[in-house]
């Protein structure tokens, strides 16, 4: 479909992302060569990255689709070339082991230790706060996007306001994930917790706290697994591994911004 110049069907991106698991797992079984594994991973990632460019611009769905088009094959890259240390070393990991790795990055639920489980009163307060915050984020969406579009289409684009608005829009776009966090906590009675995307960034007291513990926790966790860990295992220093993770984060954000705000689909932006 892409080779003929037409647009891919709407199910192409979900199929490509889900297909990453069996495709990369099969590659792992067929060849031990890191060159061939890297070539397959690079080709598959290129295919995934091309698909969101055909989606409508300036929508939340396009932004999230472009994020998944980037992070799913990136996780596959890591699994092929530098598997995590908690996978068995004696034999090639099973499909189930791969599924658990991908599933945790997509839906990071973990059990809360008995001594740290919140009381029901705290669960109720947290749930009410989360629902209110999610509603505010949801209804702020059309206003913020309209302002961003107006500024982005000016002859002279105001860089600072656009940067601030894009950052706020990224935080706003997590309303559905916020509701999922509340649902997991309520349904499990506090026994399980879903890692939030952001942790009240506005309460940060330093830049280090923003980037280290509060902002974009899901992507931070993913980059720690897919970039920082493999770099450390390859012998790089902690500083170099951190720099590589930060650079990959920059590439991800530039790709998402390019897909969301480009004017012409399937062609030059």
Image: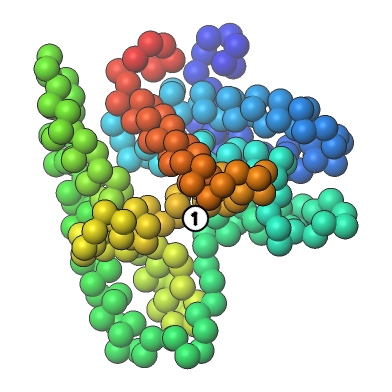
| Picture quarter with the N terminus | top right
- Which of these two is toward me, 158 or 142? 158
| In this rendering, position of residue 163 left or right of residue 124 | left
Colouring mode (rainbow / by chain / secondary structure / one colour)? rainbow
Residue at (29% x, 45% y) in the render: 170
Q: Residue 11: x and y, percent?
A: 54, 34
Residue at (51% x, 23% y) in the render: 50
Q: For residue 12, what is the image quadrant?
A: top right
* Residue topped by disc 1: 221
Neighbour tally class for label 1: few under 14, some 14-19, many 20 plus, Cα within 10 Å: some
Q: For residue 60, what is the image quadrant?
A: top left
Q: Residue 246: x and y, percent?
A: 43, 41
Above or below, 115 relative to 5? below
- Which of these two is toward me, 189 or 218? 218
Tally the marks: 1
Residue at (21% x, 36% y) in the render: 163
Q: Residue 110: x and y, percent?
A: 54, 71
Residue 175 in view, yes or no: no
Mark 1, secondary structure of its residue:
helix
| In this rendering, position of residue 97 left or right of residue 260 | right
Residue at (65% x, 45% y) in the render: 235
């Amino acid at each position: 479909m892409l080779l003929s110049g037409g647009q891919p069907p709407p199910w192409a991106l979900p199929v490509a992302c889900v297909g990453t698991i069996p495709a990369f797992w099969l590659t792992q079984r067929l060849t031990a060569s890191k060159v061939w594994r890297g070539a397959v991973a690079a080709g598959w990632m290129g295919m995934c990255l091309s698909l969101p460019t055909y989606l409508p611009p300036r929508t939340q769905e396009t932004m999230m689709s472009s994020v998944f088009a980037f992070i799913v094959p990136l996780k596959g890259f890591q699994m092929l070339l530098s598997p995590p240390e908690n996978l068995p070393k004696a034999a090639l990991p099973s499909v189930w082991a791969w599924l658990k790795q991908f599933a945790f990055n997509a839906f990071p639920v973990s059990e809360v230790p008995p001594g740290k489980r919140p009381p029901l009163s705290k669960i109720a307060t947290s749930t009410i706060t989360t629902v209110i915050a999610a509603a505010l984020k949801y209804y702020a969406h059309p206003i913020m996007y309209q302002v961003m579009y107006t500024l982005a289409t000016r002859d002279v684009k105001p860089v600072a306001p656009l940067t601030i608005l894009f950052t706020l829009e990224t935080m706003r776009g997590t309303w559905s994930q916020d509701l999922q966090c509340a649902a997991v906590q309520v349904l499990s009675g506090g026994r399980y917790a879903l890692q939030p995307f952001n942790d009240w960034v506005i309460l940060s007291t330093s830049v280090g706290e923003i980037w280290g513990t509060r902002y974009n926790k899901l992507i931070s966790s993913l980059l720690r697994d897919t970039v920082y860990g493999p770099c450390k295992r390859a012998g790089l220093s902690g500083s170099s591994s951190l720099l590589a993770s930060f650079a990959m984060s920059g590439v991800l954000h530039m790709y998402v911004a390019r897909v969301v705000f480009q004017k012409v689909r399937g062609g030059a932006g």
